[in-house]
Image (cartoon, grey):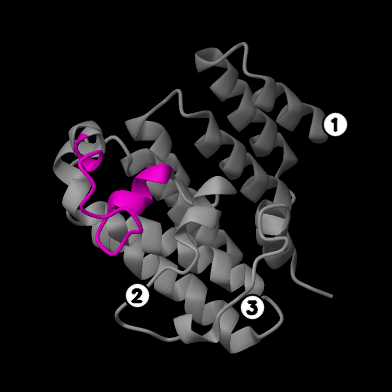
Amino acid sequence: MLPRARFKLLLVFSFTVLGMIFSPNNSYSDNWEIKDFERKIKLKILPEYCAYMQGGSRAGSPHADRYKEYLGEGWRHTHHYCWGLDKMLLATLNIAVENQYKYYLGSALTEFDYVLKRVSDHFILKPEILSRKGMTLSSLERDAEATHSFLSAIQLKPDYVFSYIELSKLYSKNGKMEEARKVLNRALEYSPNSPRLTEALAKLE
């Protein structure tokens, strides 16, 4: 039986990876190349701005300027975040192969940390990247580090619902149901009308 952390990651991507074909040419590469850019964007596996980054399917397009303005100082590093998201997907596709599963998760962490070390706390995507890092650490059973990453995201953006929900899932996974509820109730103070929070709380009952 698959460990719960792996099963959780599988569920995250299960509906988006249907019909996608894994290319072994992506494996163990230091010069990362994302395959099927447009399909992954259409399926919302990757954000659209990833296509305009280094190596992206729309790199060099004049439309990239709007994303440069939106992302500001972190623009030149954000392709590493996109690579990390792609590696989270590949970890899921290799979930039955222990060494590749751990390799891709570890490699995703490297990409996330690359960005986090080079941007300020004002970078608009930093809470999101910290949360994805937390998910990846949780999948590697590094729960203390995952908790710290989620809390760091919440500190930067107290109304970021995604971080609260993922932290609550982590507490729940470890049987800390009271902490899981407290996290979601705290989130409701900032986003009282969030259906995602209401749904997450209902699942804990």
Disc 3 crowd, CA 10 A, few/some/many (<14, 14-19, 20+): some
Q: Which residue is mark 1?
A: 205
**Circle 1 sits in a helix, a strand or a loop, which is it?**
loop
Q: Which residue is mark 3?
A: 94
Instruction: Determine whether 185 is above or below 95 in the image.
Output: above
Q: Magenta segment: does it hold 56?
A: yes
Picture disc at residue 32: 2
Q: Tell which tag, 1 or 3, sits nearer the viewer.
A: 3
The stretch in magenta equals: 48-65
Q: Examine the image and state in which quarter residue 188 appears.
A: top right
Disc 2 crowd, CA 10 A, few/some/many (<14, 14-19, 20+): some
The x, y position of residue 136, in whole percent, is 52, 61
Is residue 38 at least partly visible in the picture?
A: yes
Measured in 3D between alpha carbons, the distance from the residue under mark 1 to the one under mark 2, in whole angstroms, is 43 Å
Measured in 3D between alpha carbons, the distance from the residue under mark 1 to the one under mark 3, in whole angstroms, is 33 Å
Sequence order check, earlier mark of 2 and 3 = 2
